[in-house]
Amino acid sequence: MAVAEMIKSIAQAPEKEYYLPGHRTCAGCGPALAYRLIAKAAGKNTIFIGPTGCMYVANTSYACGPWAVPWTHAQITNGGAVGSGIEAAFKMMIKKGKIQDEFPNIIVMAGDGGAIDIGLQAASAMMYRGHDVLFVMYDNESYANTGIQTSPATPYGATTMFTPAGPEIPEAKKFFPKDPMALFCGGGHPEVKYGATASVSYPIDLMNKVRKGLAYEGPAFLHVQCPCPKGWTFPADRTVELGKLAVEVGMWFLYELENGVKKFSYTPKKLKPVEEYLQTQGRFSHLQPEHIAKLQAWVNAKAQNLGLEVPLPPVR
Amino acid sequence: MTTLSKDLAASRQFISANDAVSYGVRLCRPEVIAAYPITPQTTVVEKLSEFVANQEMDCQYVNVESEHSAMAACLGAALMGCRTFTASSSQGLLYMCEMLHYVSGSRLPIVMMNANRTVAAPWNIYGDHRDSIAMRDAGWLQLYVESAQEALDTVIQAYKVAENHQVMTPVMVCLDGFVLTHTYEVVKVPSQAEVDRFLPPYAPTENRLDLAAPKSCCISVSPEWQTEYRYKQHAAMQAAKKIIGDVDAAFGAQFGRRYGGLLEEYRCEDAEYVLLMMGTIAGTARLVVDKLREGGVKAGLVKIRSFRPFPREEIVRLAQGVKGIGIVDRDISFGYEGALGTEVKGAVQGAAPAINFIAGLSGRDVTKDNIEAMYRKVIDLARGQAEEEIQFVGLRWEQW
């Protein structure tokens, strides 16, 4: 494993941008911020694979794209497979002496659907085969580019266009989300030595996790929470604030799984009640006390499962 | 270019057509192969994995989890400027469908082999053309072959055609499942040096991922430009018509074997009754033509090698002076007719009366007697007798 050069402060972060302004994402777009930070951390010698999702649709139009490094679209199903092919090709070209380049950072930037729903099969296979690719799941918790439909990353109790609240299903989304870290980094994919969660609201932490993941030879996984003003229904100037609040209430946990060892990157002194988070977003405005209690119980159980030893709010 | 540790010398080998494809692929030195197994394609990619394991091929072999990912991995590798290969069949080809369109629209010269097998339901693993015909409009060149030798030679030709900068379009080499893929014949395997001379390393265009010259690939294109992209795809396919012929001729000059380019005619010079078909049925039909000729019937046959691009002009010319045409389809487009039937009849525009025979579905044997009966029906039609325009050959409840 190469040693990743860590960034200690925003002032020390590279100034050079590889995801440039001029794209057409929404104001306050969390995924766009993630792209910018990830591209900045990865640097020049990088190839991005972008399965269909917001970060494809809103970023590309004919003869116009925001990337200053090579980028290709992949189907929403197969970011992992296109990444595998690019990696295999690069290995072969280096072996044959066709190119003199250093092996590049190959990064798949998949949305939540492209990572753990329709894209799960190819992502899993890429990690199983041990391709030297960083698979990033930029998670805005819905199929956002088609107009906010539920995905397996959408939280319990959120309204989406496919899970409206009504008398039949008063809490809107009934299911609890999949756990991508458990799926990919819980030991089921032995080649994955490094996995981490991150948030756009903790940029230094995010950039360093990108570098650590890239430094590992073989597949690495990064699950990045990216608040989405449109999908979550909050004002566009509150993206970073909401990402922080998610961590304060335990709707997001920041940790790494490195060679099977878990390490929290940041832990609040105590978790705030989840209701404080729910109140900030229109997608939860319909929730009744019993639903909030159910979600709080889920948060508390998750904190305990992860081994977070801080005081938890009561479940009312 | 690195040399193989075990470069092939020219040889004659008693092998299956699937093995012949594997030898053809090996000789073309692909750099990335991605494959998923399906009957009756499997032995092609098994053999290739053996070549790689034995250091007889210098190639990254990726065992993907699906056909969709097989083509996706080839797309990624081709975007890097590598020569790639995959193979599939039937349900697998259908599962790959989305990626077939994506690869052709991205103008990547991937070569694949398809072991023609019918499409479920009802489930059946045997051969007909319903899988590849269903991919007719995926923007791939489709070449249908008749023998193991033609399969090997066509794989080599396919790379040469696909990678021509006027074409830059993927090619599917189609072999009838089992009756060709799993039957054995003596095959001349050319030497690595000879094939290297015919097929130089792949020289990609600027349409690729390059760290030194960053660009976005497989982009989205707005309505203002999409038509122009489609026009260029079509123009490339049209240009491929001549290039398929040129490559076949150059191959013939070097290796002593050629296949007629877009199509092969057999005893068509003065033919009055002509059957057109694709794939292995042509082998049986040749014997029937010889027998009919001995009996004084001016029979001929046309083996269509290239279904896409379609050899319209050649077929129009052949139809001149012909009294009757039969088109043999190993597929059926439900609610209309066989796909080859539609294409041929559309080309000749009534220049001769025609019957579309639907035969050999799902591995049903097409016998000499069946083929002779088809010629007789075409002759009857030409002589003014009433014949159904579309006929399923050998239906159990009909007299054939």
Image (spheres, helix red, strand yellow):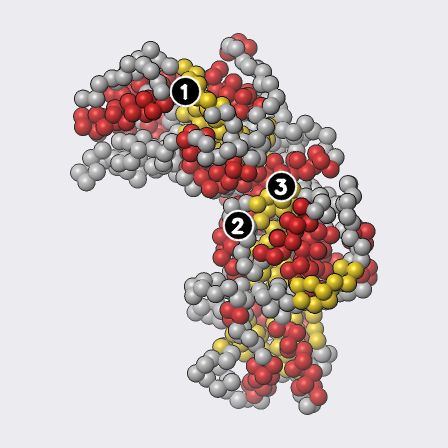
Residue found 58% across the figure and 79% down from its top: B367
* Residue B178 image position (x, y, % from top left): 58, 66
Residue found 51% across the figure and 78% down from its top: B393
Residue found 51% across the figure and 71% down from its top: B361
Residue A141 occupies which quadrant of the picture? top left
Q: Earlier in the sequence, mark 2 or mark 3?
A: 2
Give B176 or B384, whichever is nearer the viewer.
Answer: B176
Residue found 31% across the figure and 38% down from its top: A161
What label sits on residue B67 in the rendered view? 2
Name the residue type under label 3: Ala
Give B173 or B271, whichever is nearer the viewer.
Answer: B173
Instruction: Let me know if marks 1 and 2 both belong to one chain.
Output: no
Tell me how many marks there are: 3
For mark 3, what is the residue? B77
- Circle 2 sits in a helix, a strand or a loop, which is it? helix
Instruction: Let me know if marks 3 and 1 both belong to one chain.
Output: no
Q: Chain of mark 2?
A: B
For mark 1, what is the residue? A254
Residue A177 occupies which quadrant of the picture? top left
Name the residue type under label 2: Glu
Name the residue type under label 1: Leu
User: Residues under labels 2 and 3: Cα distance?
Assistant: 15 Å
State whether residue B235 appears in this view.
no
* Residue A139 image position (x, y, % from top left): 41, 29
Disc 3: CA contacts within 10 A as few (<14), some (14-19) or many (>=20): many
* Residue A97 image position (x, y, % from top left): 74, 35
